[in-house]
Image (cartoon, grey):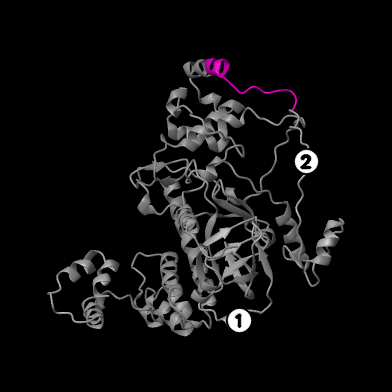
Amino acid sequence: MCKSFGGTLDGAALEWLTNVPPGSISCLSELINAFYQQFASSRQLEKQTSDLYRLVQGPTESVRDYFNRFNCEKIGIKNCDVRTAIEAFKRGLIPNSELYREITKYPCATFEEVRSRATAQMRIEDDEVIRTASQRSTGGSSDRRSYTPRNNNWRHQPYVRQNQVQSVNQYYDTNNVYRNERVEHPNISDYGFNVDIGGVVNALQNVGGTVRWPRKSDRPDSMKNMSKWCDFHRDNGHTTEECISLKKEVAYLLKQGHLKELLSDKGKETFSKEQTTLPGPTISSERPDPPPFNKVVNVISGGLDICGLTSSAAKKINRGESETMEEGQTEDEVALHKSLTVMAITFDDSDSVDTQREHHDGLVISLTIGNALIKRILVDNGSSANVLFLEALQEMGLEEKNIVRRSTVLVGFSGEALRTVGEILLPTYAEGVNMMTKFNVVDCPSAYNVILGRPWIHKMKAVPSTYHQSIKFPTKWGVMEIKGQQRDAKKCYETALKPSKSSI
């Protein structure tokens, strides 16, 4: 046994074993005790709630960064005491800060109250950043960056369709080549504008709603080249001359007839020649017929609970009978529901700027569920249920007695069946929308902590896109977006490839 013990070691532990004096170990128990004494300091101790007192907000650290750092540590503590966590969070705040004074004057009973007040302070900080940037752009700051003002709420406005009449058979738009396809576009300087690139960006303000302004990158500042600034994105990471989105937008706008007044005589001549020689896709006048088929494959499905609906409700919808609004809803709630229903959600290439060009990753996000920030959440519109895995539930500090013992059967795509432990109702927070969500609790190994299926997606009126690594949904503040985390998606995929005893 002592000889085989070394086969389980590597690194420093193996080096220690090779240096043990010969004849100093007489049995396996002595070897184990000597090993424990040597590496006792390397043992990973279980975190306690009192460890949260070590977290302190930095002098220049924002409330958002401090709260996220605190919450990540809190999630790793089993059976975390809420009162101790609230007191530790308050002690860690900058003394005499607005949030510290508010929590001191009005104590919080739950950590959800702390989250709400911290979120309010985050909004104030974000507004101050926007105000500072606006003052810098209009006040003649000495900053070397040329700042271009524009409507900050452009991404949260419903899309308004232009008054264009198209034939039913017109399924291809040649102008889309200039904006959406991944083609090489010339540099801005190659067009021969009579203004510099900053003047071109400023001229986009006069074009109106035709311009699609890109959003800022979600990457942290540590991963950006802070020495480079882009006027079009209003963000660091690359220069305006290197901006691919700007090249696409200028090419598209020129094709639409905009910005031509900025072209010099030589530039107009060059642009006209390029348009006459530009190879374009062949467009047929009629859409081709679909390929013939000689077999129809249907699908069999059923159960007492179909995608979150009762059987009677599902049958009523199937007959074309509309469901009435829930009783007790106010006129404002009905109006809000209607406004969210008509709000358009679109995706374009600007949504995939930060994603890898060629990928097959699933959409994995992070959300606040209950009192914990849950990572590795798979958004799966192929799932008819919201699934919370038992191990993740235990890590959240929730007890199994909170589970409603209403078991059901989940069936995988290859026909294997798995009976759930029960159900649990938890608040799910997504970009201002806090919604109670029913989860089916499953006790089996998984690479993910949570799977959000069609019940949550449809209730949020959300549209996920795995290609753009994004999910968008309408709110009373406009269309909000949650970006996917490709690194976590790849790790989950690698974990899922490992053999397991059971899966769903």
Provide the secondary structure element on which disc 2 rests. Answer: loop
Above or below — where is 182 with respect to 431?
above
Which circle marks residue 402 in the picture?
1
**The one of 125 and 48 positioned closer to us in this rendering:** 48
Q: Residue 376: horizontal and vertical position, in percent?
A: 50, 61
Which circle marks residue 216 in the picture?
none
Which circle marks residue 295 in the picture?
2
Amino acid type at circle 1 is Asn
Q: Quadrant of residue 161?
A: top right
Q: Mark 2 and mark 1 in contact (Cβ < 8 Å)? A: no
**The one of 40 and 143 positioned closer to us in this rendering:** 40
- Horizontal side of 406 relative to 375 (left or right) equals right
Which quadrant is the C terminus positioned in?
A: bottom right
Q: Quadrant of residue 337?
A: bottom right
Magenta stretch: residue 277 in it?
yes
Above or below — where is 19 with respect to 130?
below
| Residue occupying image coordinates x 43% and y 69% | 72
Amino acid type at circle 2 is Lys
Q: Main secondary structure of the magenta part?
A: loop
Q: Give the mark, 1 or 2, whose residue is nearer the N terminus.
A: 2
**The one of 46 and 48 positioned closer to us in this rendering:** 46
Provide the secondary structure element on which disc 1 rests. Answer: helix
Q: Quadrant of residue 401?
A: bottom right
Q: Residue 488: horizontal and vertical position, in percent?
A: 46, 57
Above or below — where is 40 with respect to 255?
below
Real-space Cα separation, disc 1 to disc 2, in angstroms:
49 Å
Magenta stretch: residue 336 in it?
no
The boundaries of the magenta stretch are: 272-287
